[in-house]
Amino acid sequence: MAQGVVQVTHTSSSRWRRRTGEYETLAAALEAAGDGDVLSINPGTYRENLVVQRAITLRGAEGPGSVRIAPVGGVALTVRASATVQDLSIEGQDTSAAALLIEGSAPELSGLRVSTRSAVGIEVRDSARPTVRRCTVDNPAGLGISILESSGGLFEDVEVVSAGQTGISVRGGASPRLERCRIHNTNGAGLSLTGEGTAAEAIGCEVYEVKGTGVQVASRAAGHLTDCQVHRTTGDGITLDTDAVLTLSDCDIHDIPENAIDLRSRSVLTLTRSSVRRFGRNGLSVWDPGTRVDANQCQIHDSQGDYPAVWVSDGAAAILDSCRVRDVPDALFVLDRGSRVDVVDSDISQVRNTAVSVSDGAVVQLDDCRIREAATGAWFRDHGSGGTLASCTIDDVQTGVIVTKGADPTVERCTVTNPGEAGFYVSAGGRGTFTGCRVTGSRSYGFHIIDGCRSTLTRCRTERCARGGYEFAEPGPVTEDCSGDHSGESTQQIPLPILPATAAERQTAPAPQSYGLLGGVPEQRAPEPAPAARPEPARESDDVLAELDALVGLDSVKREVRTLIDLIAVGRRRQEAGLKAPSLRRHLVFTGSPGTGKTTVARLYGEILASLGVLEQGHLVEVARVDLVGEHVGSTAIRTQEAFDRARGGVLFIDEAYALAPEDSGRDFGREAIDTLVKLMEDHRDAVVVIVAGYTAEMQRFLESNPGVASRFSRTITFGDYSPEELLRIVRAQADEHQYQLADDAGEALLKYFTAIPKGPAFGNGRTARQTFESMVERHAGRLAHVTEPSHEELQLLYPEDLPALP
């Protein structure tokens, strides 16, 4: 190394006199320097491991980038004093050590470029409190910056250019302050706060281009982000877990493919004047008892996926005050007993499905809120679900408020304007108390209460409702001082007397008619036909299993079904012996191409369960989307309930179930069918076995459409495509059944035919084999129709020329 590479300006006791020395190595200069001395390093590359232990100034003589500290191994630069380090490039190659280590001191670092492939770019530990300004860290091999062991300090205008792991990791009780920092191109979280006592404050920072979570707060850590941006991650934008606490003020979370913000396990988030937009799943995802979100003056909008903007479940809570939620599939989705959402003075608009959905015993409270441009304003779905809507306006929706299946909300002083369907719709055992509510301009009824639901209406009014102000089915709701513009007078419902009926009358009487409180007498409706009788199982389990075994191919399917049957059979024997039986979910997912025997196996499965006494009847009810999804709000739940009731004691087989969860759902009602089905499967788990079937990839989407769907099914059974040999066996079986025979060379021709036939989406497997046989029979008939007296053999034999052309 050339002489005089490091110049040290030594201070003396006199403020006017200084002395200068030049040293050949940095180590020698550091050894000679004392507190207050200045070390100016000439340009070059220094392969030394530096340790600064005095309050000196260490800087590049010719500015940033001119000096490289690049040892072969170990820590390139260690600072253990209140030194000043400026304008150096620090490079490390040790994957087990930091490139720059700051220990137990409060140095000032500025203009540093840490470009390394070390375990950590900059590590701060042992209660150090550095001030780091205008520095960059590029470490594609490990952590960008690690702050731990009760350390802290100020990081100002610092940029983590890349990191192989987390960009900035704060743990072990550390508490730094980050100002105007940029963290991007990391392969772990952008910013991670972990551990009790850990806290960080970030102001004006940006986290983006992260392969993972943008900001992660966990294990009792706390953070406060002000005027920060988190965007373009591959995982969630922000996650809180296990008693984490985070405050976001004036922040912007956007362009997130997963949840914008996800909270779990008693975490608490305070969100003020912040924006959450362009997210792929939930804008806010809030789980578990004790977890809470408090959002004030925030905006949640522009969902890019098919998930609710705000999801609150498993006993969590959320408060939205003066917020705006818009352009989303569903706005608020609250489920599970103990879950609660309070919304005050907020706007919810441009909702493709339901603005407020409440189910499984959850509760909401909406005060002075405005809902517009939604399919449904608010839907209280099932028993125990409720809460209060007070002084809310609901405009330009299909249906204002829906109450079904035992839900019992309180709705006060609310106005529904211009609904496409009913303003308030109650069915399937729903209740609800409606006080001082008003419906104007409905294209259907104002209040449509069917199934004899016992709601309570007090001082309600309807105006300009196309089909009538009120439509009730007896015994119907209790009303007081309700009025409509057709009569302009208050009317109170008086229950009609009920006369005793004979057994024959009760058997044949039509459903009670609705006479509409103020809407006139509706047209008469024919009584619905009685459901068809369910067939009794007529065969023993051994006979049904023999038919299953006789099916062509499907070896793996047969093994799966036999395993299930064995588990169920032994479980029943354990019960009979006074032992605890394993808890088994009997619902199944069948995946595979068409024509692979899914419906046949479902029918046999039901018969076997009936023969074992698990199901009462074992009959098969086969439905598809068209049988479950209605044409207007509320009808889908009823259709799904009816299909489920028809299958009681047997198997409900839903073919092409993925059609209930289309990729672009829009205002599709398929989600309602799925929600209803999940609830019924839980409430009546022993009454019906549900089997859903469809293509493999599409069925995965169906299972992800509702958090409760996948958990309701015990296993997925995959039906593989038939081989050419198996297709030939199916044709031979068809020929035997219909008293035909294949000529000697017809079998070989069929093998070649089934090998060459395209196996695209239109390929029907067993169906294709049967259609091929039918085509051969047609061609055979065409040949023999012109033969005057065909022989007995000719009437039976099928030849290669009878094969149809390849499609």
Image (spheres, grey):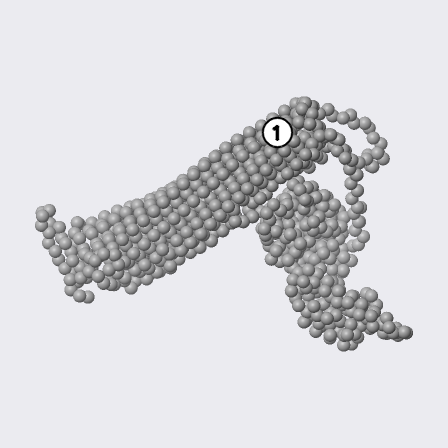
Residue 659: give x, y in percent of width and height: 64, 52
Image quarter of residue 672: top right
Residue 337 in sight:
no
Residue at 70 percent across and 57 percent down: it is 598
Taking the image as shown, residue 244 lies to the left or right of residue 768, namely left
Where is mark 1, residue-wise?
Answer: 438
**In the figure, 683 relative to 573: above or below?**
above
Name the residue at the bottom extreme. 745
Residue 456: give x, y in percent of width and height: 65, 28
Residue at 71 percent across and 50 percent down: it is 623
Where's the N terminus, which quadrant? Answer: bottom left
Residue 80: give x, y in percent of width and height: 25, 51
Q: 136 or 326, which lies in front?
A: 326
Name the residue at the right extreme. 789
Taking the image as shown, residue 394 lies to the left or right of residue 46, namely right
* Label 1: few (<14), some (14–19) or many (≥20) C-alpha neighbours in 10 Å: many
Residue at 68 percent across and 44 percent down: it is 630
Element type where label 1 sits in the image:
strand
Q: 407 or 93, which lies in front?
A: 407
Q: 55 or 807, which lies in front?
A: 807
Residue 780: give x, y in percent of width and height: 81, 71
Residue 798 in sight:
yes
Q: 44 or 785, which lies in front?
A: 785
Residue at 42 percent across and 54 percent down: it is 209
Residue type at mark 1 is Arg
